[in-house]
Image (tube, helix red, strand yellow):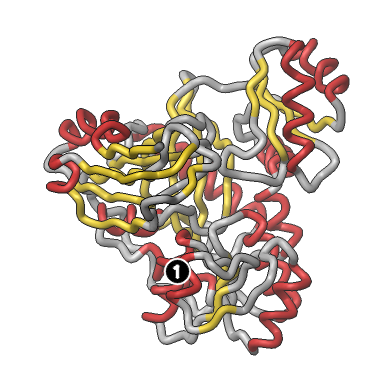
Amino acid sequence: MIVGGSHAEIPLIEAAKRAGFRVATSGNRPRDLGHAYADQYAGADFSDADAITLVAEKLGATAIISGCNDFAALSTAAAAERLGLGGHDPHNVALRIHHKDRFRELLRELHIPTPASTTVSSAQLAREWAEAIGFPLIVKPVDLTGGKGISVCASPAEIEAAVSAALAISRQPYVIVEQFLSGSRHGFTCFVESGVVGFWFADDEQYYLNQYLVSGTTTPSSLPGTAIDELIAQIELIAQKLALVDGLMHVQCIQTADGPRIIELCRRCPGDLYPRFVSNSTGFDYAAAVVGYEAAGGAAAPRPNVPTAPVTRHVMMADRPGTLRTINKDKVVTDHLVDALEWWRPGDKVAQPLVDKFGILFMRWATPSQMAAITPKLTELVAIYVD
């Protein structure tokens, strides 16, 4: 059973089927793209651990795989624990990783550098804390990812709206407020066995209209070797402290003047076809490794890190609301295109430009310098026409 069934879960569905599983997908949106790739759709809200447990039990699932969402990761951990299925951390451990406030506490406990932060249930409490810390600050829901509900505050006047926005979409009665860090933003993904990092892969992140929603990635990463070494040491420290099960650990980090700072950590597959991004660059079957570990059958020992070919992952997003007319790709894009998944159709509505997606493209380049020159122009080279 795969806890989800959107476009993001397609690589996991395909990998599970290659491994010989009969695959059922869940989620409460039966029209999601991933369901068509599965053998069966078993509808259930993936944020509802009780519902996911019940469906997995009815299916007689012998393995359960988290979808590409933190709510799915938490429900998967709870269901696996209740049903005696391996491949996942206990639910209380999963909460320490996936809830931002608990994760910040863990980093402080391990003396891993992290921005000063606190949890608040009101704007007044946030203002009082800000008086001692200063600005700018960033306000986030503790339980959401993908840039949802995030605001940066440069002054006390902006705190009220920021806290209200975060509380409005969080399932918790409090939000996290923390120091805003400046620097370049990156993804770092790896597999651990017995608390030791084996295969790892790093990227540079790009953003479009929504400055807190990743809209593209490139590799090789600009992260220096010293930052990679520091991240590996920190990840191993976390894995050993929490006695994490073998498998995937994925972080988002900011490279500051003082070194890398882990902002988020998750134990579920990143979304927007990230496994294809890794495999198109390295040849490593990332999705198969995720399934192998989470299905509790184990995976082949993580291979040593391999050289990365220059690859860009570009998420197609419009710049305004309206009706999508067509999408045109420049020849430089089509000449370097090595993989793609597109689901747009003429007449599709662009209701929320900050989050609506219409496809994902993967381009491989001759050199990193060619990638660096062309990638910033992709929002023009992949022209999305909206009426």
Q: Quadrant of residue 84?
A: bottom right
**Residue that carries the numbered disc 1 in the rendered image:** 12
Q: In this view of the protein, which residue sits in the foreground, 312 or 114?
A: 312
Viewer-nearest residue: 349 or 63: 349
Q: In the rendered image of this protein, does residue 374 appear above or below residue 350?
A: above
Residue 176 x/y as whole percent: 74, 33
Q: Position of residue 337 (x, y in %)?
A: 20, 51
| Residue at disc 1, secondary structure | helix
Whether residue 233 appears in this view of the structure is no
Identified by mark 1, the residue type is Leu
Q: Say left or right for 28 vs 327.
A: right
What residue lies at 61% left-to-right and 35% top-to-bottom?
112
- Taking the spot 23% from the left edge, 50% from the top edge, the residue there is 307
Residue under the image location 70 percent in, 73 percent down: 52
The quarter of the picture where residue 28 lies is: bottom right
Quadrant of the drawing holding the N terminus: bottom right
Pick the quarter of the image with the C terminus. Answer: top left
Can residue 369 be spotted in the picture?
Answer: yes
Give how far across and how far down residue 363 sits, in percent: 23, 47
Coordinates of residue 13 in the picture (x, y in percent)? 45, 73
